[in-house]
Amino acid sequence: MKIKTPIYLDNNSTTQIDPRVLETMLPYLQDRFGNSSSNHSFGWIAKSAVENSRDIISNFLKVSSKEIYFTSGATESINLVHLGLTENINPDSFHIITSNLEHSASTESLKHLSQKGFDITFINVDNSGIINPTKIADAITDKTKLVSLIFANNEIGTINDIKTISQICKEHNILFHVDTTQAVGKLKFDLAEINLDFMSFTAHKLYGPKGIGALYINSKNPKAKLVQRIFGGTQEGIIKPGTLNVPAIVGFGKAIELCEAEMEKDYEHTKRLRDSFYKYISSNLEGIIPNGSMTERLPNNLNLCVVGVRADKLMLELRELAFSNSSACASGSTKPSRILKAIGLTDEQALCSVRFGFGRFNTKDEIDYASQKVVEAINKLRTLINKKSQNHKQTVTI
């Protein structure tokens, strides 16, 4: 059987839009093109579609539809929380706890606040890549107002104990924001059981369109209020003013609907592919080391240190496979991944690490083919490296 290449194995970066999602969006790019704020039939149709998607998402999360606000993506949602909570606040009175495992959207916005005088505590993780809830509790002071953490890491896929940490925050009356970008649609969790005040997520990680995300704000907590940071309209309760991206919102709703219906199937499918891929590579090669916990991990994520082989060289050798050597948001950087450094890897180990992300549309035949090609490429590169090393030694001896 001929395999179509390139094979896409970067589903933690973004996902292919599901054809059923695209089909749902198309009418709103054609005949139903109205502005959802317009007071006529075109606007009413668009407004109805927006609210239908809002209802789908809120029902999925078991929250009120009035608690869901559409944004341009998780990055904007995260920034709206960090900047909206701290606007007009005395920095000396507002301590924030986060970790060194966060996505750059969180890390960079919090560094910005640090430069403005806010006290930010970055909790270190161990080599498992999981945040210890006890460390969160130990870092709390009488000035701690916010804990902001990632649910599942985008590079190494490790899953944090958000439920326990949420209980700690509730006991201390501290606001809790969670970046659930990688978790929504992959992991089952219930906001009726987890005490979150803010939750950021996006559509394009779960087979929906790019450029659309959402922010959940807990209306039951009077402290969970954001100061307006963007101006120009009254859409989305002033949280995110501006003309709504109706086609993308419709696609977001459909993507969530499909995730709810097919989450268990997707979970088992991607985990089976991931485990098969890893088993073949690790049984045919030495020096293949998984980065982070292999048990508390997203089902579709595999991050490996390939001892002795730089990730950029491997990616050039395997042009028929699409995978990555870091977060897509940092792919232009030549520096070692700060996430991998955070879990104890050396610069060299981090530079020899690659991430594979498996998805709904990958097949077993693709993964069998890809795993064989990876083994062949690593063997080839290691042979070349050994030859160069031997030639260098001979030259030095002469």
Image (cartoon, rainbow, N blue to C red):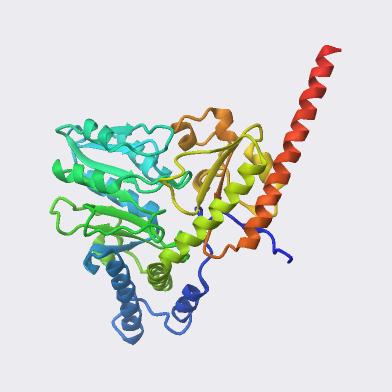
Residue 183: quadrant of the picture: bottom left
Answer yes or no: is residue 283 visible.
yes
Q: Is residue 25 above or below residue 385?
A: below
Residue at the image point whose x is 40% and y is 61% from the top = 185
Quadrant into which the C terminus falls: top right
Answer yes or no: is residue 357 visible.
no
Q: Please indicate whether residue 19 sits to the left or right of residue 118 in the image.
A: right
Residue at the image point whose x is 69% and y is 45% from the top = 375
Towards the viewer: 309 or 45? 309
Q: Please indicate whether residue 234 sits to the left or right of residue 187 in the image.
A: left
Residue 115: quadrant of the picture: top left
Q: Please indicate whether residue 351 sits to the left or right of residue 175 in the image.
A: right
Q: Is residue 236 above or below residue 109?
A: below
Towards the viewer: 25 or 154? 154
Residue at the image point whose x is 14% and y is 54% from the top = 221
Quadrant into which the N terminus falls: bottom right
Residue furthest out toward the front = 283
